[in-house]
Amino acid sequence: MVGIVCDAGLARIRLVNDSDDKTEDSRGSRGAPGHDPFSMVVLAGIVLVAVAGAAVLLRGGADDVRETKTITPTALPALKDTSAMEPRAVTATSPSAASLSAESQAVEPSTRLPVTRGGGGIVNFFDENRRVVYWWQDVPEGVRRDSIPTGEHSNMLREDYVGSVSCAKCHEGKHADWHGHAHRRMHELASEATVEGDFSGTGPASQIRYLGGLARFHTERGEFRMSLERGGETRTYSVLRTIGSRFFQYYVGKLIEGPDVAGLPLRSVEHVLPFGWWIDKAEWVPTVHVFRLTREDDEGFDPFSPDELSDYDSSCASCHTTVASGDWMLRDGGAKRLSWYTPRSLLLHVPGYLRERQPDFLPDFQAGMTLEQIVADTHEKFRGMPIQAEAAELGISCEACHNGCREHVKQSEETTSDSLPYFFPVGRNLFSEGADRETLRQTDLNRNFACSRCHSAARPQYASGHHTWNSTEYAEAVRGACYESKPESGHGLQALTCVKCHDPHKATGRTWARTPDQDDQSCLDCHQQFAAAASREAHTHHKVGSGGARCMNCHMPRINEGLQAMVRTHRIFNPTEKSMIEANQPNACNLCHLDKPIDWTIAKLQEWYGDDHEYDEGALVANYPNRRGGVGEGWLKSEHGATRLTAAAAFARQRDRAALPMLIESLAVEPKLINRQFAQKDLEAWLGVRLKERGYQFYMNPTERRAVVDHIKDELLSKAGLPK
């Protein structure tokens, strides 16, 4: 069922499509969050709300959903240019249906264009919020009347962006903090100043052997090159841009020499290259979580047989780059995230925006051209938008969060301003729901929305729906317990915000800098009923100051794969979570008590938090082959890769010598490349060795790994004081 709900103008515009799947998009890489592999999907969220000769009737009632009847697409009439029309002032009360313009009351929307899927089809919104409309006809008068009036102010066009250097004069401290942030270096042109990897072309540090091939990294006529050789074939890629600078640096380029025909996208499209530089280890490693995002494992990708590529500009760059917010709304990832996380309903008049922003992107509305064709054509142009030419700034700069600040800079002195910036997109063709202009300023909702624009996507999941790896912090947080005010709870709690724990201008650094006491205080600021030591001990059943009394160890455990270490989930939940316990996947109790059986854990939870915490006995029998054995050891043997990864990291944090033989063996037998990488790093830190110097690399083939592990395992056990 496809329909539209709108109570009185713009108060609650939503699209409904019950047949659509509600799967979020996948994106991101290690060091490169933001990649969207489904870039071939026609622009998510472009909505078919008008047909030839028919307009949508906007009526009261948020639950007024009408069924859609499918008709054959017809030609779209000429679009009137309404971009210069000024929104009217917001009325004190929502107008009735009778007060809407004759245009918007003209026809009952009993028929609309069909929503289809596939190559040239049109895809509707992906989740239940559906509070965004991409409009292709004249903007209804009721929508204009009920939107927030922002005058001629605009912060969403490319020309509204002035660059981070303009911020430094008045905001020197924040600018200096941001200059040291990894955000700034998320996307840069490749140069001597920006490239971290060894492109010297001499010595083992400038090459990697992988899957029977050799990759070499060198320079030629002052330009960076990546050459891949195997089976008598050589492909050489130019290295044009860099991704990231904190733990890994990946690279963007295109094929310039090789056996492949000239017309292949490898030669014309700038894409993510298959090897990256691990900064801490000063070595080259395979690129992961880019080419096979629909797989749990990266082993299936063969960089020497280039059947796949990841187009950087059409997908990843939306999050790695400061893109004008209006353009972002018309790109794949932006259109989806806008509909998922916008704090208010809004309508974008697409033809008006295109006339302002990029007239060349506006299709020629020829007679007989269907709306489907127009939408697909516009999408393809925005998807293929050359980022270097069209983006406001490479990297994640000030205006990536603050939107275009041209008017603010123009009307400001060092200590005063006659035009404070809006913190939400505004423009002549964007019609936003809200009480007044102040709702578009720096509110908590708008700050969170700024973070959601990149820190949200899909990842592989645990049984509970928690994501198993990183870059989705906002998407996780809003599915947890603390991101909505709950006055009915009686605690007077406030909604949590991203900036409560994270200073958006200051770099996190190599490790989390806040102390456990400071982390606890972030929780206690709201949950004051646990501020007293006695109350906290009664709640946690652990002594204050111990690991079991730390709020985040129970409610935000380390079950999320970070860039090179396990990090905390941002989805705040309880350690009694049924689906994780029943599935034999990580629970907070056993992450500390790895040696305890699951029945011990359940008994404690029921003793402390009530007998109503019941678990399906059939699921426990099916998923715990050894009910008397330690849960941690069972996790190490799990068929679920993320569970094995979490368990191995927990054993390594605790320096549990009893688990050391299994961890060493995992270097040889673990099927997931990421798990072996983390195990290698953790064991090196634990035992004070460099496994590479002993011949081991996590990306070696199984036979090679087996031989090296058999050779070095006795030495590793001895270092921990264990018998050989």
Image (spheres, grey):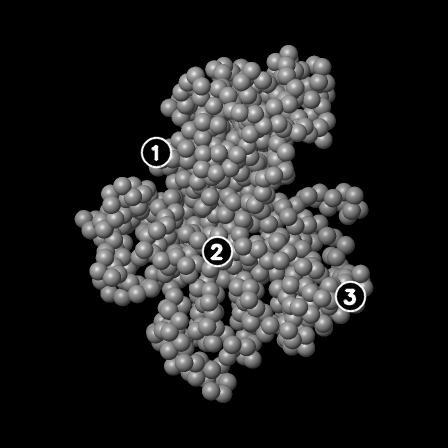
Give the foreground label among 1 and 2. 2
Which labelled disc corresponds to residue 389? 1
The residue tagged with tag 3: helix, strand or loop? helix
Disc 2 vs disc 3: Cβ atoms closer than 8 Å?
A: no
584 above or below 662?
A: above
Chain-order first, disc 3 or disc 1: 1
Residue at the front extreme, as displayed: 72
Q: Position of residue 610 (x, y in %)?
A: 80, 62
Q: Which residue is more in the foreground, 597 or 154?
A: 597
Chain-order first, disc 2 or disc 3: 2
Which labelled disc corresponds to residue 606? 3
Residue at 66% x, 21% y: name it: 58
Disc 3 vs disc 1: Cβ atoms closer than 8 Å?
A: no
Q: Which residue is more in the foreground, 226 or 445?
A: 226
Mark 3 nearby-residue class (10 Å; few <14, some 14–19, many ≥20): some
The residue tagged with tag 2: helix, strand or loop? loop
C-alpha gap between disc 2 and disc 3: 37 Å
Kindly indicate the quadrant of the structure image that contains residue 5.
Answer: top right
User: In this rendering, does residue 376 appear at all?
Assistant: yes
